[in-house]
Amino acid sequence: MSQPELPSPPDDAADATPRSLALEDWLTVLTMAALALITFANVLVRYFTDASFAWTEEFSVFLMIVLALVGGSAAVARDRHIRIEFFSSGGSAMRQRRLAQLGALMVTVLFTLMAALSVRLVWDDYRYGETSPGIGVPQWWYSIWYPVLTGLIAWRAFGLLLRISRRPPAP
């Protein structure tokens, strides 16, 4: 007995999602695993020794920021970012398309600006020798990831804008 064949997706569905979200998916998995491991290790150390690892809170906050930015990138790439459905789903198909394009363009502009400004933040952290408040490591070790991850979100938003613009308008 053979398996039934699944229907093939429509031709325009191939361009509806990004080619690969493996980067965001793997970064999410690795970040969550690191958060779970260091938190669990800190709980065990606290339970058995009445002390704690000093670096875990600072590093956990950093990992949660990374997780939020990586999740934001995946949400933008999958076109799942927040929107007001009353406005984005109402009106004609052309209006919906134009609003989707405007939204993707605004996300691209915002995160490009954030990436550019965070480069200056990293430079200032490096130049002035800022150290982290908890464990005293150079602050730029943490802040170097802001321009990288906000740039990734901007790149994904630009890709979304291109995908929306390439879609044929609905009748």
Image: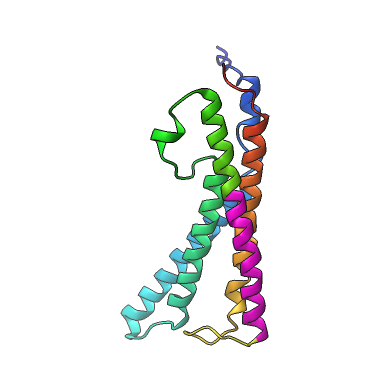
- Majority secondary structure of magenta residues: helix
Q: Vertically, is 62 above or below 151?
A: below
Instruction: Look at 39% across and 34% down and name the residue there.
Output: 86
Q: Count numbered badges in the picture.
A: 0
Residue 115 relative to residue 43: left or right: right
Instruction: Look at 53% across and 40% down and name the residue there.
Output: 79
Residue 62 relative to residue 141: left or right: left
Q: Vertically, is 96 above or below 22?
A: above
Q: Is residue 117 magenta?
A: yes
Q: Which residues are magenta?
A: 107-127
Q: Vertically, is 85 above or below 21?
A: above
Q: Is residue 36 magenta?
A: no
Residue 171 percent across, percent down from the top left: 57, 16
Residue 46 relative to residue 160: left or right: left
Instruction: Look at 52% across and 52% down and name the residue there.
Output: 72
Corner quadrant of residue 123: bottom right
Task: Evaluate whether residue 25 shows in this view.
Answer: no
**Residue 116 versus residue 77: which sits nearer the camera?**
116
Residue 31 percent across, percent down from the top left: 52, 61
Residue sticking out furthest to the top: 1
Task: Evaluate whether residue 75 shows in this view.
Answer: yes
Residue 155 percent across, percent down from the top left: 66, 50
Residue 153 relative to residue 88: left or right: right
**Residue 114 versus residue 61: which sits nearer the camera?**
114
